[in-house]
Amino acid sequence: MRARFRTSKLRVAIVGAGPAGFYTLDALLRAEIPLEVDLIDRLPTPFGLVRGGVAPDHQHTKAVSRAFEALLDRPEVRFWGDVELGRDIHLAELRGLYDAVVLAIGAPEDRPLGIEGEALEGVYGSGAFVGWYNGHPDWQHLDPPLDGAPAIVVGNGNVALDIARVLLKTPGEMAASDLSEPAAGRIAAHPPQSVTILGRRGPLEARFALAELRELGDLEVGPPAIVKSDELPTLPRDAGALADERESRRAERVLAVLRSYEETPVEAARLRFRFFTRPIAALGEERIRALRCQGTGFDEEGRLVDRGQPFDLRCGLLISAIGYSSEAVEDAPFDSPRGRFRAQGPRLEPGLYAAGWCLRGPSGVIGTNKHDGDAAAAAILAEVKPAAKPGRIGLHGILRGRQREWIDRAAWRAIDHRERAAATAPAPRRKLITYDELRTAAREAEQG
Ligand code: NAP
């Protein structure tokens, strides 16, 4: 048996089959050296954020999964879905089995708002809420109260825009999406009468992408409105004060789009932007019924300060879209306050690497992870020599010994096929949304 290990293949385990994991895999394969790469994910399905995070109506962004899918066909590669680090296999074991281990586990934890009432029914982080409507099996218990009451989304990033859009688009506008069936039914039956996107700073500081902001002007429910306040009686005429030239150009463009929404009457608008407002408490007995807010503004030194008296905004749903943190993994150096791994470049320790949001923090688009994947692969190729380790034969043995079943490429393809066959055109797929459904579809494939 030992002789089988004594080849010069480099054996790498990548934990996390999302964009950072796939881009690392791609970069390793491009090196064209003798290689064995195992892609391990705790979910039964690959593609991470592309499947469970990217908005269901942004199928053009999800198209990257076709390129990822093709990598699964490479003979050097195996997919091990439904295999969880810390539950089914330990990091120390993986490090013993492979020449290098790459952690590409993303940033799945919602950052808390840290306000009173955050545990009320109807208050969710964006990771949980997006996971619910995207059919992520961890979030199907969420059961958010959707009964037409106004919704508030806290945060001025693209995730806030995604959520507002998905809550307000009509079933016709979502027909070509892969919004999960239960979420589609719930939202269509009782969409919020209004959605307010709340920013603690102003329009110049918003992190919206232009295309996403423009898209809101074309919604069937009508264009968004801008809520005026003492701090923001009109939108700024220009973004001139910004030091960074690129940022300044970007802010000018964001302003131009917001300006096109400035004349929309606020009362009639289903979607509203309210800047210079920070949440201070969620009010309610069991379920949220209002958000207590505080107006803000910049002082002469450019510091954000409170302005005026607190006020309440009625709502039945509050979603905070304020960023994410990663989760600590046994024995891997973790920077808890920053919620990401501690590393020198992509290397955490000799033989242990990281890529993507779990290393860099939750920013950038899907393609940004390509740089991370390239960097992790380059470091591995420069630093790690094949040491005739057991690799996937060892992983197979450990999982079998623990009587764990996993989902391989063929089983994932069966899930994929089942989802596509169940869709009603023009929807691309009808997602299986529970672990049971996913595992059953995979098992039936093996039996059939
Ligand atoms: P983000 O772009 O970092 O935005 C987070 C927002 O939350 C900021 O406006 C921030 O305001 C605000 N915030 C943070 N803490 C807060 C608090 N305690 N109270 C109130 N507001 C708070 O994050 P994201 O929207 O989660 O997106 C994550 C990454 O994914 C981003 O890079 C985004 O561009 C990307 N993404 C891209 C797309 C797309 O391209 N279509 C779609 C979705 C996501 P401050 O600026 O004041 O801190």
Image: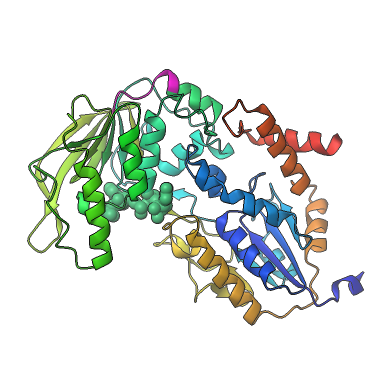
Residue 177 is situated, as x and y percent measured from the top left of the image, at: 52, 33
- Coordinates of residue 246 in the picture (x, y in percent): 28, 65
Taking the magenta stretch, the answer to whether it contains residue 189 is yes
* Magenta segment includes 192: yes
At 67% across and 51% down in the image, what residue appears? 69
Is 48 on the left-hand or right-hand side of 100?
A: left
207 vs 268: above or below: below
* Depth check, front residue: 64 or 316: 64
Rendered location of residue 262, percent (x, y): 17, 38
Instruction: Please indicate, yes or no, whether residue 278 appears anywhere in the rendered image.
Output: no
Residue shown at 49%/50% (left/top)? 108
Nearer-the-camera pick, 28 or 136: 28
Look at the image and give the residue range highlighted in magenta.
Answer: 188-194
Q: Main secondary structure of the magenta part?
A: loop
Q: Is residue 389 left or right of residue 284?
A: right
Image quarter of residue 101: bottom right
Q: In which quadrant is the C terminus drawn?
A: top right
Residue drawn 32% across and 46% down?
Answer: 113
Q: Quadrant of the N terminus?
A: bottom right
The answer to which of 122 and 431 lies nearer the viewer is 431
Q: Quadrant of residue 416?
A: top right
The residue drawn where x is 61% and y is 33% is 431
Residue 306 visible, this angle: yes
The image shows residue 254 at horizontal and vertical percentages of 26, 50
Q: Is residue 413 above or below residue 328?
A: above
Asked if residue 4 lies left or right of residue 258, the reply is right
